[in-house]
Amino acid sequence: MSSELADLYQEVVLDHGKRPRNFGPLEGATHHAEGLNPLCGDHFTVHAKVDGGVVREAKFEGSGCAISKASASVMTGVVKGKTPEEIERIFDRFHELVTEGPGDGDPEELGKLAVFGGVHEYPTRVKCASLAWHALRAALAGAREPVSTE
Amino acid sequence: MIAGSTRATEAAPRAAAARLDVAGVRAEFPILKQLVRGKPLVYLDNAATTQKPRAVVDAIRRYYEEDNANVHRGVHLLSERATRAYEEARVKVGRFVGAKDPREVIFTRGTTEGVNLVAQTFGRTRVGPGDEVLVTGMEHHSNIVPWQLLCAEKGATLRVVPVTDAGDLDLEAMAALLGPRTRLLAVTQVSNALGTVNPLPEIVALAKAKGVPVLVDGAQGVPHLGFDVSASGADFYAFSGHKMYGPTGIGVLWGRREHLEAMPPWQGGGDMILSVTFEKTTFNALPYKFEAGTPPIAGAIGLGAAVDWLAGKGLDAIAAHEERLVAHAVEALRAVPELRLFGTPRRRAGVVSFLLGDVHPHDLATIIDRQGVAVRAGHHCAQPLMQRFGVTATARASFAAYNTVEDVEALVRALHVAREVFA
């Protein structure tokens, strides 16, 4: 495998893609949103349970490629215990990572999200990595319509 | 192909067809000579768009460098030359598909525009409340949505011919669905997602027996099989230039003259009128009635060159080459462990659709691309067909005259890389 491919499909990404965490319905969820990529048909629903201004739990359902599934899987873990404002800041950092690469920022800051550092080499896959994030942000913002990557 | 060709619309390529000089063909496509991702380019996304031979690129460049002017208006020499080249392209393209009269050849932006034109003119005047429009379960979105819009506007119903597990149309069901309220049948010549070649003579006969006009989507059919509009019995035939070695932005709608004469114009503007006052506009004659505004002149000239190129190579020779290649691809892909082919139609042209284990086709296409192989991954603008097969997307390899057995081997090698990544 070429090094760029290995960067994209890191062990952790493949593992999360195959065995996604936080996958399934979420009882007592307060927020839901659908995310749709009309170009490839990837389709997720993200559920979140918000209590006291903090996301206590997040889960997702649906189907998509390894990158979109792994991203949803890692995201639903990362956002636990965070406020919507904190989640926005993490998303900004994540978006920078998948569009421009790791850069000079502190890798610690990204935590588990750092495994998506190879995505920026694949511009057509940025939407895969961002889909669940867009859905979660829409859910927290109270969106009623599915969000689309287009 | 020349005018009056007797080649049957659905005849299998003749065994006697001259063998295509594939190395010679490849040499005419400079784009194929490049490395992508450090590997020789293997272009297997021809159902999306084909590459263009030098003859087509040269024709467009020559037009812009030597003849560029607007058509049908200037009395100056350049306009005369541009008009002549544009109209010659119409004659060539008409001849290529067996049109009896070049006035039946309407230049459009592509297949999609052709279908919309028919839906918005022929359809709007023929379809009313309670009527039905019949499409099939293997249509591209562009041969579904224009009819859906029409049905919604008119209070009509869209009916769908089912697709069998093999990926063929269920003709018995089609016969039953063709009823007294059916106002039009819209059917593809070749499925862009499965490669199924539909038995059009049989289908047209079924429709004609019920007095139902037929629109054929030729986007995927014309580059592989050609078509004889006059012999086919069809009423409309729409296709795109860019899938048959021509430029993007140009396509053709062929229609029976009596229909085209009776249809109201679609878009209004220059070129489609004879005279305009604020009280009344008199529309131009065919084909200009349907060509409002400055047409894609360079596109038409490029398409004319593409048709010359195809005729020069021989459509039968190209079809025979592609048929061998696709048969080889099907065999080679079947030998890849965990590979699942979609559709085993009675006859196939140009396209093989597949999935590998539980690897998502987008991941597959990304990995394959890194090996220099371009395939399409997605729903192929045929979501109802994907749903029919219980998937959201597939990977699709599609072939053209310049593809080789080595291209198939490169695809198979790339698939093995994908298996390693997702082992």
Image (cartoon, coloured by chain):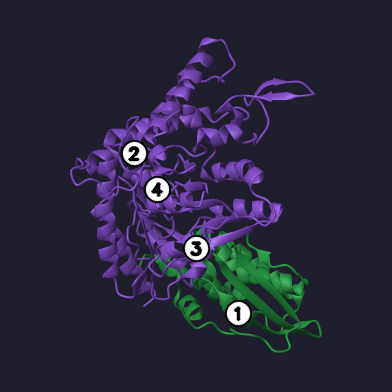
Chain colours: A green, B purple
- The subunit letter for the residue under badge 4 reads B
Name which residue type carries label 1.
Glu
- The subunit letter for the residue under badge 1 reads A
State yes or no: discs 1 and 2 in contact (Cβ < 8 Å).
no
Q: Residues within 10 Å of mark 4 (few under 14, many from 20)?
A: many
Disc sitting over residue A61 in the figure: 1
- The subunit letter for the residue under badge 2 reads B
Q: Residues within 10 Å of mark 1 (few under 14, many from 20)?
A: many
Q: In the image, are marks 4 and 1 on the same chain?
A: no
Q: Position of residue A102 (x, y in %)?
A: 55, 65
The answer to which of A125 and B401 lies nearer the viewer is B401
Which numbered disc, 4 or 3, marks the residue closer to the eye?
3
| Relative to A39, A54 lies left or right | right
Name which residue type carries label 3.
Ala
Question: Residue at horizontal 24%, vertical 38%?
Answer: B24
Q: Residues within 10 Å of mark 2 (few under 14, many from 20)?
A: few
Q: In the image, are marks 2 and 4 on the same chain?
A: yes
Residue marked by disc 4: B221
Sequence-wise, the earlier of marks 3 and 2 is 2
Question: Rounded to the nearest whole Å, what is the CA distance between mark 1 and mark 2?
Answer: 46 Å
Question: Rounded to the nearest whole Å, what is the CA distance between mark 4 and mark 3?
Answer: 26 Å
